[in-house]
Image (spheres, grey):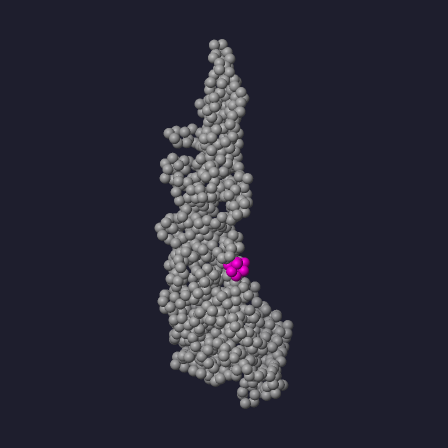
Amino acid sequence: MALAACSDSNDGDDPGSDNAKVDRIVVTPEQSFLWTGEQFTLAAFAYDRDGALLKNVTFTWSGTDSKVASVEDGHVRAASSGVSLVTASAGGVTSSPVVMMVVDAPESMSTSDEYIAQAAELGLLTPAEVLTYRVYAAFSDPRLPVQYKGRASGGFDTDALQDIIDQYDTLPAETKAALDPYLVPPADGASWLAPPGGGGQGLGNGRPTCKASTDGWDFVNSTQAKVNVWYQFTVPGQKEKAALVSEAIEKDIWPKLIDVLGFPEPLPDTGGGCSLNSPKLDVFLVRNVDFRGLTVPEFGAPYQSSVFIMVNESLPPDELKASAAHELMHAIHWAYRTKSFQMSYGWIRDAVANWAIDAVYGKSIQLEQDFANCYLSTPDLPLQDRSKGHCTGSNAGAERDYGAYLWFQYVANTLGPSTVKSILSATQSVDTGVEAIDNVVPGGFQKHWPLFGKMLWNQAPVDSKPASFSTWDSLKEPVKSVDAHGDLAGAAEKKEELESELKNLSHRVYYFDFKDPATRSVLFYNGFFEPKKAGKHLKVQAMWMDGAGTWQEEDWSDYEFVGLCRDIKDQRAQHLVIILSNAETEPGGSVTATRAPYLKRNNIGCWKIQGTATVVEKQAGWTGLGRKGVSTVSYEVDASGAALNFKSPLFPDTLRVGANLLMSPSGSFSFEVSYGDSPCSYSFGPANFVIAPLSGFLKTNPFPELHSPDDAVTGWLKQSGRAYVGGLVDNSSVSEVVTGKDCQSPHFSVTGGLLVTNDVNNEVDVNPPTVLPDGRFVKSFSASGFTFDWSFTPQAQP
């Protein structure tokens, strides 16, 4: 239905030229309740003696108490508790006063929606009243009962109007009458912003109807523009803001999204809607609303619709532009005929709309980044989650999905922005945004979800890469991680369990920092190893900085256990990041680990164990010292066992695990003989020897939860944690001098056993020693006339 035409922006305006014609002035709204610090915009309507609304009137505004509320050009700023009466004057005529009641804001305050929901839960409100009050709160309608006035929601838009549309046919007649003015374009004579006495025409054919009037409104653009941008000429400063929005749409937003990226044009309102002046898309600057922008579809068109857009006129210039880009993308989405109800696609709508800000303005306007924390603060929630309470600052009331633009920023920069268009197009044939993405993106979520999760880290080593949110968009905020100190803090062992449930299309991020060199052996248990083997689309990614300051990036998904030996320079993790990703797409699903993943660490040396071992042999009947060996020895893992890619065949499905089973000795020892065994006396040395290769071993049991197909290894793992065994033997020939009656000299022997740590019975170690709580290997062992004493300490690779 075409309405009465309004003047074009090319018509000349002469501010104040109509002042002499003023016969009556009405200021709306008649009253308002404000919190201290709140701002509010009044509109003054001047009429001539024939009742015609005058356009070119300059008003003088005044208030009875500027300490309570200041007023300038109709813009009220509440300052302190009290009451101020505000009037507007022009041409010697003064309006009736409107009441500005100001109250100190409570220290802790909920939003109006929260207060209304609480009242509904207590049975104090009917469903119709809940819906009505939600709308009143969103549009600052003075009919909202004062007990439901809360703080600004911080949301980008409101769902209240869409809820009216969805429930309209079931609403009582009085509720429809109260809400109808909010369902027609603001510039229409039946709207909530119509001049006094003009709004709320009522119902027509069961739907809100428009009036053939646009009094108080004008559009700022030329008739050749793609979009009409409307403003109220009764509100000072709105025309300039409308011009800014129009220029942004015509020069930046429309050309980028539609002409360059190829998105479809919004549908013209040539059907049964309210076609104001032309079938073009209409954008309206509106005042005193609790949202940045809002796109409203026609009635009875849930799949595809023409729309009108409202933008909050109080926004600063860059936010006006960004909000216009966001809402124009909503209008574009409504141009697709989706398979299911358009609103059922939920999260993808606001995520793509916020991405559109970046698509148009790049780094020059970054409003979308104000919502990044909504998503980055909750990586453990599914991509589709739309809950509130996750955003911070002025956007605290926004839904989480506004931050999900990051996914589309990833898609656009990785696969090209045309992929985003293809995803929206795919909603014409599938029921959900997730299905659309999985059908369009090469490799689907299985390939890209882990890559996206890793990129969310957004700090070293990710943020400096060409493909990163930092590089693409100068985003500074990283994903929220669960942080823990990796160091032992004086303990012998420490274990951190990770969450065992991973929701579909979610991530969990963990960060550990290490500073203490006494934290030596580290083991990660991947509790998602078995579900991954069973076909679940899971990924475990790790990034860690080594001792040289170089970041290592590894995929741990196919390993049940992964080790790090911090004694080895190349494995000396200073920072460790673990990212768990679930690319399963079933809504509401999750994957549970076989057992909770964990990161375990202890102070057991894992590269080199160094110290001294002393053996004294003194058999029964011997006198004197006996046979004594003193070894200065180092047990060290093989070079291959110290490699970053070490995989022991004794421990399948592991990485850097098992090198501790064979630590080989090197060093030297001294040996001397001095004893008597009547009637002979024996002597040798002392003399020094070099420990030969393969002359001994040391093995430890730092992580007994490991398992192996090898029976001998399995037997060893059954020993207590921190157990170790070692041996050292040398077969160098010794020529002992023998003196005494009837004694033969020399006596030839070998140096023999230099270290034995415990008994062995049927190839099973009996009561092996354990590493002391401080990490030292110290003990004595005696058997068959031999006494072994040793003291070793772990060493770090320089």
Question: Looking at the rendering, in which quadrant would you find the C terminus?
Answer: top right
Q: Residue at x 52, y 23 (%)?
A: 671
Give coordinates of residue 239: x percent, y percent. Answer: 56, 77
Q: Residue at x 60, y 82 (%)?
A: 15
Q: Nearer the viewer, residue 762 or 367?
A: 367
Give coordinates of residue 416: x percent, y percent. Answer: 45, 62
Give coordinates of residue 414: x percent, y percent. Answer: 46, 60
Q: Which residues are magenta?
A: 469-476
Residue 473 among magenta residues? yes
Q: Is residue 582 left or right of residue 323?
A: left
Give coordinates of residue 163: x percent, y percent. Answer: 43, 71
> Hey, which residue is sitting farthest bottom in the picture?
50
From where the camera sits, is residue 290 visible? no
764, above or below 217, in the image: above
Q: Residue at x 54, y 41 (%)?
A: 517
Q: Is residue 166 left or right of residue 774?
A: left
Q: Nearer the viewer, residue 595 or 702?
A: 702
